[in-house]
Amino acid sequence: VGTRSLVQILNDSTAAINTTGLTITQDAAIRAAYFNQTANGRVLEIESAATSAAMFYSIPTGLTTGAMWSNQADTTLTTGSLVDISSNSADVSARNLFSITNDNALATGAICIRAKQDSTARGISIDCTHATYNGNALDIDVDRAANSAYDFLECTSGNVADAEARIRGDGEI
């Protein structure tokens, strides 16, 4: 708003469905694009009119031991956040604001979410702030029928050496 563009790539034809606005190919083992914002402004801003397509889509074709996305913050972070995701939609439809899916049943060692806290603050905090809140702060759903062969929850200490509490799949505590 109120700015000028030094470089602009414009495809203003809705019929040009097989047109890619910008392609960067980098054969060397170094970054393909670099942005250096030296003032207090956004580095990258993406606006999309998509209603059902992914706004950001990544295809890691050979990734094995690396990370698809890595954010190495420098040590100047104080009260900010590494990731801040916010939705302000008043729509009452059921939806997930953050969703992680392991889509391969053979990936038995895959952990969907891991939080590692190296300091003394909470590892995970759930804060339900509505004055008339009446839902579950944490909902655990297992498709398998009640059975003692799995646990809903296991609480350990001593670097996982001591099992302090366990809620089994058959409801036993």
Image (cartoon, grey):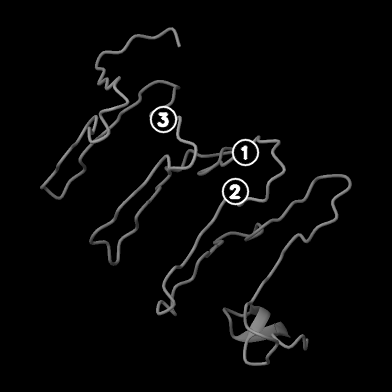
Q: Secondary structure at mark 3?
A: loop
Distance Cα–Cα, label 1 vs label 3: 16 Å
Residue 147 sits in quarter: bottom right
Q: Position of residue 135 (x, y in %)?
A: 81, 58
Total count of labels = 3
Tell which residue pokes out farthest to the left in this image. Answer: 27
Q: In the rendered image, which residue does mark 1 sit on?
A: 87
Instruction: Tell me which residue sits at (49%, 71%) in the image.
Output: 111
Whether 105 is drawn above or below 168: the answer is above
On the image, which quarter does residue 22 sit in? top left
Tag 3 or tag 2, which sits nearer the N-term?
3
CA gap, disc 2 and disc 3? 18 Å
Residue 91: x, y in percent? 69, 39
- The answer to which of marks 1 and 3 sits earlier in the sequence is 3
Q: Which mark is residue 97?
A: 2
What residue would you read off at disc 3? 46
**Residue kind at label 1, given as amino acid type:** Ser
- The residue under label 2 is which amino acid type? Leu
Cα gap from disc 1 to disc 2, whole angstroms: 7 Å
Give the residue displayed 45% in from the left and 35% down from the top: 50
Q: Is residue 116 left or right of residue 63?
A: right
- State whether residue 71 is above or below residue 154: above
Q: Nearer the viewer, residue 121 or 142?
A: 142
In this rendering, position of residue 3 left or right of residue 111: left
The answer to whether the residues at label 1 and label 2 have Cβ atoms under 8 Å apart is yes
Locate the C terminus by quadrant. Answer: bottom right
